[in-house]
Image (cartoon, rainbow, N blue to C red):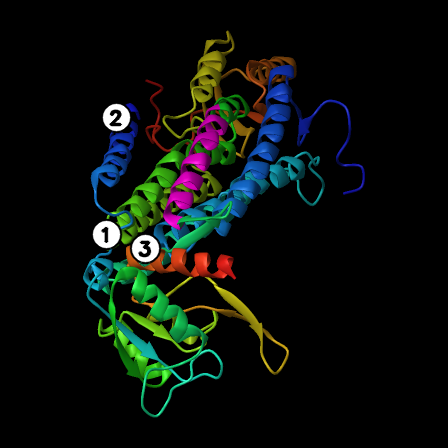
Amino acid sequence: MRSSVTHGPVRFGHTTLPEEQQAALRRAVKFEWITLAFLAASTGLVYVVLGNSQAMKAAWVEDLLSFLPPLSFLVASRAIRRRPSEEHPYGFHRAVGIAHVVAAVALTVMGAYLIVDSGIGLLTAEHPTIGGFELFGQTIWLGWVMIFAMLLTAGPPVYLGHVKMKLAEKLHDKVLYADADMNKADWMTALAAAVGVAGIGLGWWWADAVAALVISASILHDGIRNTRAAVSALMDKRARTFDDAEPHPLGGRIDNYLSSLEWTGTAKSRIRDEGHVFHVESFVVPADGHMPSMKQLEDARQACIDLDWKVQDMVVIPVSELPSEFLPGVPASGGEG
Amino acid sequence: MKIPRMMAAAMLAGALALTACGTSFPADPDGTLDRVTGGTLRVGASDNGEWVSLTANGEPQGREPDLVRAFAAKLGAEIEWSEGTEHVLAEGLKHGELDLVIGGLHDKTPWEKDAGLTRVYAESVDSRGQGRKHVMLVPKGENSFLLELDRFLMASEAAK
């Protein structure tokens, strides 16, 4: 590490974060620690009352897996502060992507395992056994305690998810987004488990296995969706917004700006999302084939970097025509139209 | 997000409301408690020292048969005793031929996959100095019957 992690203004690689993003990062770190503390308490509580309910087991495993995204975020948010080095000229931004893949694969594997496990329980007509629980000298049905525990742990993640979702947008952080998205849906898991246990109480032995299947399917769904997003990000898919909803508008803004300069004819960029920050290669066709001056080029690059904090690692390349081999979607020959 | 949340809440509320007017909660999928109450309690006993002592002719004696007789009396049930090895009795439980199995069993019993366990109602130390937590076996998922037995075992433990 040496002195690569410095105090003072927070940097991602060699990008210094603006005030707003620094505040968002501090808040995100704080809320991820709160998430970890909540998870420690809730997994502990649920473990105590786990009993023989498959739905409770599935909800518990999901809680355990929920540790991964906050941990990934906290580890990655430290790793990416290191400055690029000779050995790592692009910096350490990919740490985020790697953390994302690891968490996503864990979700997928556990989701698939739990579907098989719960499915076997349903097919073999496993009747879940839930007996008495000693509470203040009274013997009450353990199922009540399970339902209570589930309802108790249903609420807080929804709040945490909402807060983290806003921060994920500010920081352009996909791990934080995935974490927030899972938290926001967590109440459904808790409620499904509670309904499953209530079903056992009504004498519907299958309700537990069905609830467990619903929970497992949601874990698997989260896993597959996250694996797909994480893998395509590592494969340098075109930069998209933090929620992958649409191509990131920054690409259009850079192209418009560069095309509008007096010395340029047309310009087009390819952008990859390194996690938080972008790597931008902008191809610029000068007007009338006149080579721009060194100052014009440097000014244009600086203006693009000033557009958004995510742009820092950027190259501007003057070309005689837009190279279709690097810019798929650009017509192969001639034509600027 | 609003609609599924409302629906799920309604489902849970419905389930809880059902329990309020239902006769027993938790309920037995196979109705063991209803059948046994004022009927016959089919008990399997496996010989195991002071816990269960089988006699050549006559009812099993020992700590657990005494508990079972008191429990049956509480339910107004006749006891129909069966004797056998733990394996045979666990099979009987699994196939619905028995309602309760005793034999000085402890909570690490290998029959857990075929049977439900009561709560730990007594603890002992075996000849090797290892602590044992004692339980009885019931049919899987007959939760109303199990809760009734758990309550009885806890009360009799507290009474001592």
Relative to residue A29, is residue B113 depicted above or below? below
Residue B77 in the image, given as x and y percentages of width and height: 24, 66
Determine which of the numbered discs, if any, sits on residue B3 in the image: 2
Residues flagged by tags 3 and 1 on a common chain: yes
- Residue A218 location in percent, x, y? 34, 43
Closer to the eye: label 3 or 1:
1
- Residue drawn 45% across the image and 22% down it: A251
Q: Which region shows up in magenta?
A: A142-162
What label sits on residue A203 in the rendered view?
A: 1
Q: Examine the residues drawn in magenta and state their main secondary structure.
A: helix
What is the secondary structure assignment of the residue under circle 3? helix
The residue that disc 3 covers is A115
Amino acid marked by disc 2: Ile
Q: Nearer the viewer, residue A332 or B36?
A: B36
- Please check the rendered image and state whether residue A70 is part of the magenta-colored stretch, yes or no: no
Q: Label 1 is placed on what type of residue?
A: Gly
Instruction: Specify the quadrant that holds the N terminus of chain A.
Output: top right
